[in-house]
Image (cartoon, helix red, strand yellow):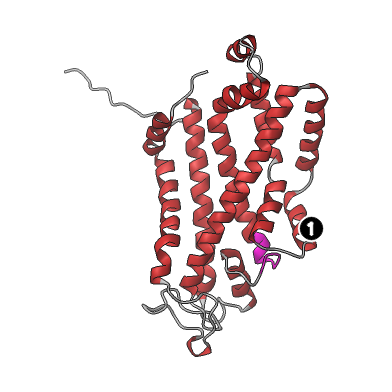
Amino acid sequence: MKRLHFPNWLHLLLANPKSRLGLGIISFIVLLTAIGPFFASKDPNAFNLLAARQAPSWHHLFGTTDQGSDVFAQVVVGARRSLLLGFAAATLATSIATILGVLAAYSGGLVDEGINALINIFLVLPTIPLLIFISGSLKSRGLWTMVLVLGLVLWAFEARILRSQALSLRNRDFLAAARVRGERQLYIVVVEVIPTMTSLLVACFLTNALYAVLFASSLQFIGLGDPNTVSWGTMLYWAQNNAALQTGQPMWAIAPGACIAALGAAFALLNYAFDEIGNPALRPVRRTRVKRAG
């Protein structure tokens, strides 16, 4: 199986219009978290009733809340937390899916049957009600608690895909050659099997990041997050509770909602791009014009 090195992946990634757009959106959000505090120097949790419910202006780019907090400052802080939550939860979920999926395929026997049964159980359980039940049962609903909950719930579908891919690789010639050389099983899995699944692992990571951001924001929106921390989901929660759209504070609800949609779209675009890179059959066909003679 042919493996693409990093420069080739980078070239294909930058040549794909979907990935360029997705990377552009994520880069803008990262840049916002880096330089945004210089423009939003105000404390996002500060209360100033004299500045409550102000319209967008140069002093308050997105206006203020009903308690005078700067909405733009909250968007900047929320971007940092949403990116961290999405990447951390996706890393945990993809790691669990990779370990269990590859272990099941490569081990076979009772190990494969046990892990496959566990995957089937998690696939049958409805994700959103399960997340609501777990989040509602926890006393601590901080960032890392949310990361742990999402990571332990979102791994099953990707584990099934990775198991199927690993099963198709188990009897390949390069793995048989590694066994003949006397390589250890851990070496074969880490060095020989997993690198051939790079595009699939990236797609799994991006899918988990997309769902982590959307599910976390949804849980925070319905009040199952930490209302004392600033995130895009909690901004929507407080905007809804204070009827922001009805009281002349539209940016309090529109700004975090648009940011969540943009970040989710960026992860989805990158996922589509990696599918096209990993599977040439999905790449768009370029039409060439044929010049007529004479």
- The answer to whether residue 255 is seen in the rendering is no
Q: Indicate the quadrant where residue 60 lies.
A: bottom left
For image coordinates 49% across by 19% down, the residue present is: 2
Query: Which kind of residue does numbered mark 1 sit on?
Result: Phe
Q: Indicate the quadrant where residue 239 lies.
A: bottom right
Please give left or right for residue 124 compared with residue 43 in the image. Answer: right
Where is residue 92? Give x, y as percent: 64, 45
Q: Residues within 10 Å of mark 1 (few under 14, many from 20)?
A: few
Number of disc labels: 1
Q: Who is closer to the viewer here, 162 or 35?
A: 35
Viewport quadrant of the C terminus: top left
Q: Is residue 170 magenta?
A: no
Q: Which residues are magenta?
A: 218-226
Q: Who is closer to the viewer here, 229 or 179?
A: 179
Where is residue 176? Give x, y as percent: 63, 11
Where is residue 236? Give x, y as percent: 59, 69
For image coordinates 22% across by 20% down, the residue present is: 292
* Residue reaching furthest to the bottom: 50
* Residue reaching furthest to the left: 294
Where is residue 12? Give x, y as percent: 40, 33
For image coordinates 76% across by 22% down, the residue present is: 108
Is 111 above or below relative to 140? above
Q: Indicate the quadrant where residue 119 lies.
A: top right
Please give left or right for residue 41 compared with residue 52 in the image. Answer: left
Q: Is residue 219 magenta?
A: yes
Q: Which residue is mark 1?
A: 133
Q: Secondary structure at mark 1?
A: helix
For image coordinates 61% across by 46% down, the residue present is: 90
